[in-house]
Image (spheres, helix red, strand yellow):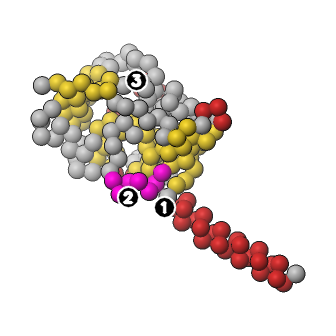
Amino acid sequence: MGTFLKDIARYFLIALLIVVPLRAYVAQPFYVVGSSMDPTFTSGEYLIIDELSYQFRDPRRGEVVVFRFPKQPSIFFIKRIIGLPGETVEIRGNKVLIHSATSTYTLTLEEPYVAQEHQKQDYLVVHLGDDEYFVLGDNREASLDSRAWGPLSRRYIIGRVLVRLFPFSRIAWLPGAAPLHQQQEP
């Protein structure tokens, strides 16, 4: 009986030494609540978040990220990165324009992942700092995002969505990854 308990304790300790660092520094589960990312992600979906990639590279435009809400860091949000550090994001109605930091180009985003054309006639210009990102939900009508609370500091970003595990009918690797069709303007 003593050997049995020692074996169980040893296996538990080994599992703990493997699982805890993996969950803390490599990947962690995330459960989607709300409709801000419909139709890309719906409420009730179970995701695995890649925390490791951003240790080696910066987040990229178009990636779906999970982050701590800047106004209340105990809450996690999921949104898509639209603007990168140093850029200026301009929203004119349903159009999103990205102006480079050096003013050498302007991109007009064509966003095939957006739920529907929202009818609000938004106008907003946001200049991003050196470690700031502009994030939006794919369901613009139901999303609390950078339009409401401003740029997202890099320090709040946890990671990008790596895998959708549930529901089984929608299992996917890098779900939500969509090429951002961009038109360059003079």
SS under mark 1: helix
Residue at left 32%, top 51%? 58
Label 3: few (<14), some (14–19) or many (≥20) C-alpha neighbours in 10 Å: few
Disc sitting over residue 25 in the figure: 1
On screen, residue 65 above or below 121: below
Tag 1 and tag 2, C-beta contact below 8 Å: yes
Q: Residue 41: where, in percent of width, then height? A: 53, 33
The earlier-in-sequence mark between 3 and 1 is 1
Instruction: Check whether the beta carbons of the residues at disc 3 and disc 1 lie within 8 A of each other.
Output: no
Left or right of residue 78, residue 23 in this image: right
- How far apart marks 3 and 1 lie (CA) works out to 32 Å
Residue 54 painted magenta: yes
Quarter location, residue 182: top left
Asked if disc 2 and disc 3 are in contact, CB closer than 8 Å, the reply is no
Residue reaching furthest to the bottom: 2
In the rendered structure, the answer to whether residue 174 lies left or right of residue 54 reads right
**Can residue 56 be seen at all in this image of the molecule?**
yes
Q: Which residue type does callout 1 highlight?
A: Tyr
Residue 113 figure quarter: top left
Residues rendered magenta in the picture: 50-57
68 or 38, which lies in front?
A: 38
**Which residue of the protein is positioned furthest toward the front in this rendering?**
173
Callout 2 secondary element: helix
Identify the residue under disc 2. 55
Evaluate whether residue 146 shows in this view.
no
Q: Earlier in the sequence, mark 1 or mark 2?
A: 1
Amino acid type indicated by mark 2? Gln
Q: Amino acid at mark 3?
A: Pro
Which residue has dot 3 on it? 112
Residue 1 at x, y percent in the picture? 88, 81
